[in-house]
Amino acid sequence: MKFIKIILKGFILIIIAAIVLLYIFDYSYILRGAKIVYFTGHKTAFIDDYPYFDNDTIKKGNNTSPWPIHKNYNHTTPTEKLSEVNKDWGTVAFLIIKNDSIWYENYHEDFNKNSKTNSFSMAKSITTALLGKAIMEGDIKSLDQPVSDYYPQYANTNVTVGDLASMASGLDWVESYTSPFSVTARANYDDDLAETILNQKVVEAPGKAFKYLSGNTELLGMVIEKATGQTLSNYLSESFWQRMGATDDALWQVDDSEHRLAKAFCCISSNARDFARFGKLYKDYGKWEGKQLLDSAYVVKSITPRFKEGPEYGYGWWLKEQNNKDFFMMRGHLGQYVIVQPEDNVIIVRLGHRKSPDDGKTEAVFTNDIVTYIDEAYKMLVHD
């Protein structure tokens, strides 16, 4: 018994020492991350995590505009394969929007059309839409405006806001979703996001090649806030959320209650129907119900590859050819997607807990689940 007490005491002292060291070396955010993830029974970030963070509200307007319901709404059942993968990969929402009307819609578990889930990196597409709005309104001069005009820390680096939007900044950022010591984990759980971002140095020539870094979009969000004098949540509400008739308030996670800097690289909590509005906005070249909310030339640039060597990305939007059709998409961690095929006037939305099993096991740009969702949706649309 005495030996067990000694072992237990030693174990407790090790834990206390580890916690002290985390605070000394400024890694205390790991404790917050562990509390949010592991102490809630999860192994990684999860789609309904917004109650565990501080949030700003993206307010809906007084004139909401629900999606029209297609005359053939839910007349077609999902394919056998789609039903199987939706179950296996934890899909909670799957929508097919055809000709601007909801053609098919299904929810799983306890989720429904009003349920909020985390956008994860789909927020990057929305943040770059805000950049386009700021340029359109003259708050930012152009895609070529230097970041140093807003943050002198980046003087003599030649990094532009366009480089941030197109993932070509050259920042010293390691995009890792597994290591608790990574800057990505720090950005998600730390209480001073601006400090984390402004510690990033430019280590490669900007504007030369695509390299996906979440820090790019966070710095871009900080620039937009400075340029417009508004928080990202307010700017999003006034610029798009209200004007597109979103039916529900949304939430944008912030670093803490004191700084309240939005996580521009991720973490807008909304529902499938309201996320889909950005697919329609870009499909229609920035126009919504006859009003030009976003410059059409900016939209075209956004959904066109900036680099020949990186054809999978434009300015904030992913680009993929599938079955001789060109798709552009919003894309987030664990398989959050708004996928658009403009010529067919089709928008596919999928929200859920995980991607296909090849996630993290291949260097391919797109995981197999994206291919599956497109293929199976089009098999269903044959019956329209």
Image (cartoon, rainbow, N blue to C red):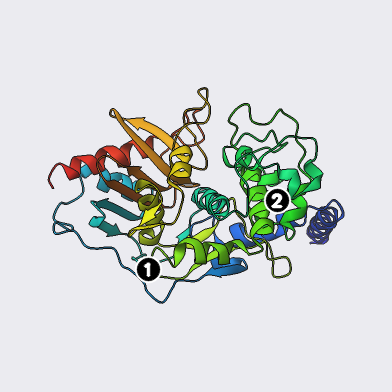
Instruction: Inspect the image, locate mark 2, and give the three-letter code of the amino acid beneath it.
Output: Arg
Query: Which mark, by number, is residue 114?
Result: 1
Is 220 above or below relative to 117?
above
Image coords of residue 149 (percent x, y): 74, 47
Indicate the secondary structure of the residue bearing disc 2: helix
Image coords of residue 311 (percent x, y): 47, 28
> Is residue 306 shown left or right of residue 337?
right
State how far apart marks 1 and 2 are (Cα). 30 Å
Mark closer to the observer (1, 2): 1
Image coords of residue 70 (percent x, y): 18, 58
Outermost bottom residue = 62
**What residue lies at 45% left-to-right and 44% top-to-bottom?**
299
Q: Nearer the viewer, residue 359 or 88?
A: 359
Label 1 crowd (10 A; few <14 / some 14-19 / many >=20): some
Instruction: Inspect the image, locate mark 1, and give the three-letter code of the amino acid beneath it.
Output: Asn
State the image quarter where residue 146 is shown.
Answer: top right
